Image (cartoon, grey):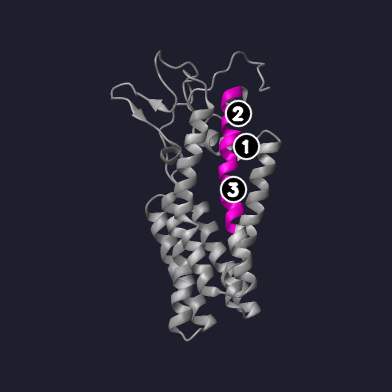
Amino acid sequence: MSGTPERDAGQEAPDTGRRTGVDTGRDGPARTESLADLLGGRRGAIDATLPPLAFAAGWLLGGESLWAGVGAALAVGAVVAGVRLRRGDRPRSVLVGLLAVCVAALIAVRTGRAENFFLIQLLSNAASALAWAVSIVVRWPLLGVLVGAVLGQRSRWRRDPALLRGYGRASWVWTATYVVRVAVFVPLYLSGQVLALVVARVALTWPLVAAALAVSWVVLRRSLPPGHPGLRHPIIKGPTASPR
């Protein structure tokens, strides 16, 4: 995920009248801050669709040549990595994205099956669905972990029962996105439908991320009680307070 929101983690008591998700700032007018503002994600999701598109283009133009598809995907993946570095994305995140493309290409070449270029994507979505679901059950919802890290809150958000409950509910939205992807990818993968996998990869990447950001924000905002000061300001009643 991309984007570097303004840090305001040092305050726990909001100004009077501040509402959920609204940050007035010291010198400017009030503005509504959403999960899309905090986490970004859509730009990174668009970047992630480019190597698979290049793979499909190379595969088709090369007469269903696996090497042509892999070469195109690696070339585009390298260009995307360079662009991300220049715009200030973290090197580790960039390298992980490029490594994923390289591993997908290697699996496809070693097995000789074009559909295996998407195997890593399928497995990672299955693992993500499980991880998000488990995080909710153990009361460490991953959405809260991500937002808390961006805001520099560490685990202070867990000491606010309303935030903990809201993050848990909103995390189910993200769990559902991974389940949907797996449900779509598996039959296409098993039937070897390469072009359909590309279409599904694009359709279920940035549009789904955008929808998840919007829906999970609505769920989170509606889960907080009236008058709650918002994500940046957990309500902590005491140093030993714990969520119930």
Q: Which mark is residue 58?
A: none
The type of residue carrying mark 2 is Leu
Residue 19 shows up from this direction? yes
- Circle 2: element type: helix
- Circle 1: element type: loop
Viewer-side label of 1, 3: 3
How far, Cα to Cα, is label 1 from label 2? 8 Å
Extent of the magenta region: 160-181
How far, Cα to Cα, is label 1 from label 3? 14 Å
Q: Could you tell me residue 36's position as x and y percent? A: 43, 41
Q: Nearer the viewer, residue 90 or 111?
A: 111
Looking at the image, is mark 1 or mark 3 earlier in the sequence?
Answer: 1
Residue 50 lies, with reference to residue 9, above or below; the image says below
| Residue tagged 2 | 164
Residue 199 lies, with reference to residue 214, above or below; the image says below
Mark 1 touching mark 3, by CB under 8 A? no
| Residue tagged 3 | 176
Q: Residue furthest left?
A: 28
Q: Residues within 10 Å of mark 1 (few under 14, many from 20)?
A: many
Which residue does the image show at 51% across and 39% down from the upper left?
216
Which residue does the image show at 50% across and 68% down from the upper left?
198
Looking at the image, is mark 3 or mark 2 earlier in the sequence?
Answer: 2
